[in-house]
Amino acid sequence: AQSVTQPDIHITVSEGASLELRCNYSYGATPYLFWYVQSPGQGLQLLLKYFSGDTLVQGIKGFEAEFKRSQSSFNLRKPSVHWSDAAEYFCAVGAEGGATNKLIFGTGTLLAVQP
Amino acid sequence: EAQVTQNPRYLITVTGKKLTVTCSQNMNHEYMSWYRQDPGLGLRQIYYSMNVEVTDKGDVPEGYKVSRKEKRNFPLILESPSPNQTSLYFCASSPYGAGTSDYEQYFGPGTRLTVT
């Protein structure tokens, strides 16, 4: 069955430090992968997505993610974190069979940023 | 502005009292979905719709109903809410189904429901 694992429930980083959020997926074919961010009290905003091609994907707000098929991973990175990046981050994979239009989400990683 | 709107944003109700959460999108999208978000579980799809009058169950449909009489609207109905339906609910829409390079879901702001 398809699944997404985000091993880190909660991460704290200092402002200005680099960030890497981990995401592992289980999927039969070439996956469609997404990272969303949810700020407190807000809906989900798409940071970036991967469908094919270049395995390093650039997104909004200075985020990037790298697709590694051999490791079944799609980790999110940012070289220098800002206090406004504090939020919950969700990795998701598009479910096989486009008719359901379903995204399968990980359980999320809550990011705290220390001054 | 292109957006997905949900109403109400917050709702506290009692067990058994029927309620409807509305969802509307102004992007002329074919596909719409409802998800619920629970701590430690992420988001799970409740129902989805591929077009007007075409709906089907997602992963957690028990206790919910939906309808799609107009392309822009996709209300979520709880006929007899129970405390285990206390959750944060998101409506989403997309122009294409999963599996296309332009696939992307646009999410509403969420509705926080508490059933006592």
Image (cartoon, rainbow, N blue to C red):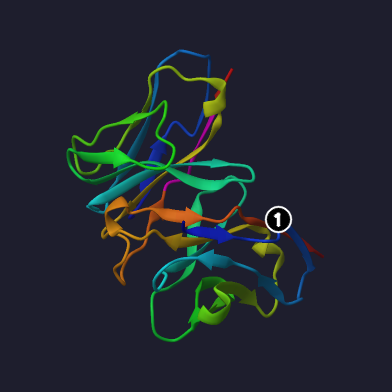
Q: Quadrant of residue B59?
A: top left
Q: In the image, residue B43 lies at what x, y percent?
A: 51, 47
Q: In the image, residue A46 lies at what x, y percent?
A: 47, 63
Direction from residue A17 to residue B108 in the image, left or right: left
Q: Secondary structure at mark 1?
A: loop
Packing grade of label 1 (10 A; few <14, some 14-19, many >=20) is: some
Residue visible at 27% across and 51% down in the picture = B31
Q: Which residue is mark 1?
A: A9
Direction from residue B48 to residue A3 in the image, left or right: right
- The reply to whether the magenta stretch includes residue B102 is no
**Residue found farthest to the bottom:** A54
Q: In the image, residue A51 lies at what x, y percent?
A: 39, 75
Direction from residue B28 to residue A45 in the image, left or right: right
User: With respect to residue A67, does A84 lie above or below?
Assistant: above
User: With respect to residue B35, does A83 lie above or below?
Assistant: below
Between residues B9 and B20, which one lies in front from this camera angle? B20
Residue visible at 27% across and 54% down in the picture = A99
Residue type (three-letter) at the residue carrying disc 1:
Ile
Residue visible at 76% across and 76% down in the picture = A17
- The reply to whether the magenta stretch includes residue B112 is yes
How many marks the image carries: the answer is 1
Judging from the image, mark 1 belongs to the subunit labelled A
Q: Quadrant of residue A28?
A: bottom left
Q: Which residues are magenta?
A: B108-113
Residue visible at 35% across and 61% down in the picture = A96
**Quarter holding the C terminus of chain A?**
bottom right
Q: In the image, residue B32 lies at what x, y percent?
A: 31, 47
